[in-house]
Image (cartoon, grey):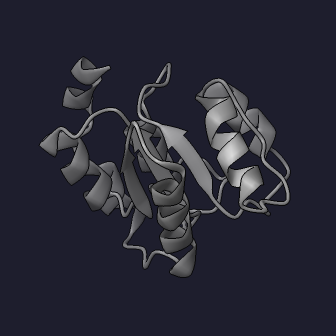
């Protein structure tokens, strides 16, 4: 899936696309950089899912990533609990797989159009996410 997303982004003129196989690899790629336009993250990741990763960013628990980082969640789950949690965490865009390239690019464009207006970190930490593990 990383290659498919990367190819779609490159086709639509993304300057640089960096892929990562999970949260730890993504954090390693982000270390020392704050110039990412958008993080595209799959829900199914380990050791935490994409919602929990977004929660850590918005909650300020990942200082290597700005809290207002644009974040697109890519998932095969249209489950209402996942959608509600993503919305509560101010996800920039939510895309259900499989996705057509033009739909994906529209979502990225929409995510890039507006930076999230953030609430205090504690508001994000309070969003329940542990019950979402069962969907992985």
- Quadrant of the drawing holding the N terminus: top right
Q: Is residue 29 left or right of residue 101?
A: right
Q: Nearer the viewer, residue 63 or 90?
A: 90
- Residue at 85% x, 60% y is 15
Q: Residue at the location (43% across, 79% down)?
A: 117
Residue positioned 25% across, 22% down in the render:
135
Residue 37, percent across and down? Answer: 69, 64
Residue 120 placement (x, y as % from top left): 38, 69
Q: Quadrant of the C terminus?
A: top left
Residue positioned 23% across, 19% down in the render: 134
**Quarter of image, res 11:** bottom right
Please indicate, yes or no, whether residue 50 appears anywhere in the rendered image. Answer: yes
The answer to whether residue 127 is visible is: no
> What number of labels is visible?
0
Above or below — where is 67 with respect to 82?
below
- Left or right of 36 in this view: 133: left
């Amino acid at each position: 899936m990383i290659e498919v997303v990367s190819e779609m982004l490159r086709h639509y003129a993304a300057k640089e696309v960096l892929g990562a196989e999970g949260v730890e690899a993504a954090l390693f790629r982000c270390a020392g950089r704050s110039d990412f336009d958008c993080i595209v993250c799959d829900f199914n990741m380990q050791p935490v899912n994409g919602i929990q990763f977004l929660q850590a960013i918005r909650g300020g628990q990942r200082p290597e990533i700005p809290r207002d980082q644009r974040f697109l969640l890519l998932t095969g789950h249209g489950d209402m609990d996942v959608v509600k949690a993503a919305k509560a965490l101010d996800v920039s865009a939510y895309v259900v797989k499989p996705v057509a390239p033009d739909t994906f690019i529209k979502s990225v464009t929409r995510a890039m159009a507006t930076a999230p207006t953030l609430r205090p970190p504690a508001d994000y930490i309070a969003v329940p996410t542990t019950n979402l593990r069962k969907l992985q």
